[in-house]
Image (cartoon, rainbow, N blue to C red):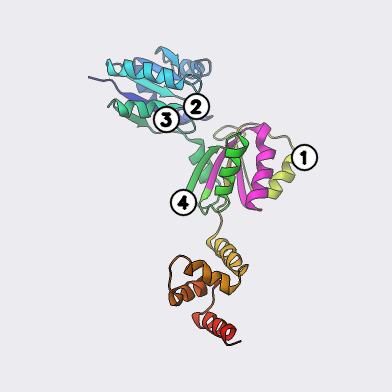
Amino acid sequence: MAGTLYLCATPIGNLGDMTPRVIETLQAVDVIAAEDTRNSIKLLNHFDIHTPMTSYHEYNKVEKARLLVEKLIAGQDIALITDAGTPAISDPGEVLVQLCQENHVPVTSLPGPSACIVALTLSGLSTRRFCFEGFLPREKKERRAILEELMGEQRTMVLYEAPHHLTGTLEELLERLGDRKITLCRELTKKFETVIPTTLSKALSLYEKEEPRGEYVLVLEGKSRQELRQEEIACWESMTIEEHMAYYEQQGIDSKTAMKQVARDRGVGKREIYAYLHQENDG
């Protein structure tokens, strides 16, 4: 019988957030796969855990995942931990989970700390709908494409950023998305936890005077439906009514239906479009 892969969430700062279930599991498994064994040994020593460790990180995630799955198929139980927080979130653990599923190896997750969720709940922004972007890619073309997608995002957005890239990212967000509400979170769960509800422009002004320190979670306001609707109307109004009608008629839509859609797009009554077109024709 195959062993089980346990995804074990570890503290993002405060060691008091380590759950009894995670401690028991880390003590009981055959092997702990850790993102950085030098970092994780401090955690294990603190909780008197002496289970053997092996490294599993971004640079060996594919090859090492195969080796770990072989151990699991052979019956060993393995715990996966990251440097901080929940494995497989902005983390190579997702590759291991996928391979386990492909090989019908049981996987279970032991809930616990996640910087994304902690920051979201502290942000004061809408939590009903949100999207998680993690770290924006450094490659310029891919980064630009993602930022363009986020321009119309209505949900609250959660991103991670390193201190030395923070001001550059804030500048790009302001340029692409306009001046939005943002909450900057750092040192979460630690003694000097900092939560700054502000705007993108004010955040940039702040870090012109103050050097960013520590890893940041950025929680960014989504675009309102009213803003999207105003942009949509502005786009249609940049066309003449004749061009707008032609846009739909070229798709095979009959004139009567096209007229209704044009009126809806422009936020006016159908009669207004009808009167304009007939006035043009009469002229």
Q: Which residue is mark 4?
A: 129
Given the image, on which type of amino acid does mark 1 rest?
Answer: Lys
Label 2, residues with CA under 10 Å away: few <14, some 14-19, many ≥20 = some
Given the image, on which type of amino acid does mark 3 rest?
Answer: Glu
Q: Which residue is mark 3?
A: 94
Front position among marks 2 and 1? 1
**Residue at position x 51%, y 83% in the image:** 271
Separation (CA) of disc 4 from disc 1: 34 Å
Label 4, residues with CA under 10 Å away: few <14, some 14-19, many ≥20 = few
Under circle 4, the secondary element is loop
Front position among marks 3 and 4? 3
Please tell me which of labels 3 and 2 falls first in the chain: 2
- In the rendered image, the vertical position of residue 79 relative to residue 201, given as above or below: above
Can you tell which mark lies on residue 15?
2
Separation (CA) of disc 2 from disc 4: 30 Å
The x, y position of residue 5, in whole percent, is 34, 24
User: On the image, which quarter does residue 1 sit in?
Assistant: top left
Please tell me which of labels 2 and 4 falls first in the chain: 2
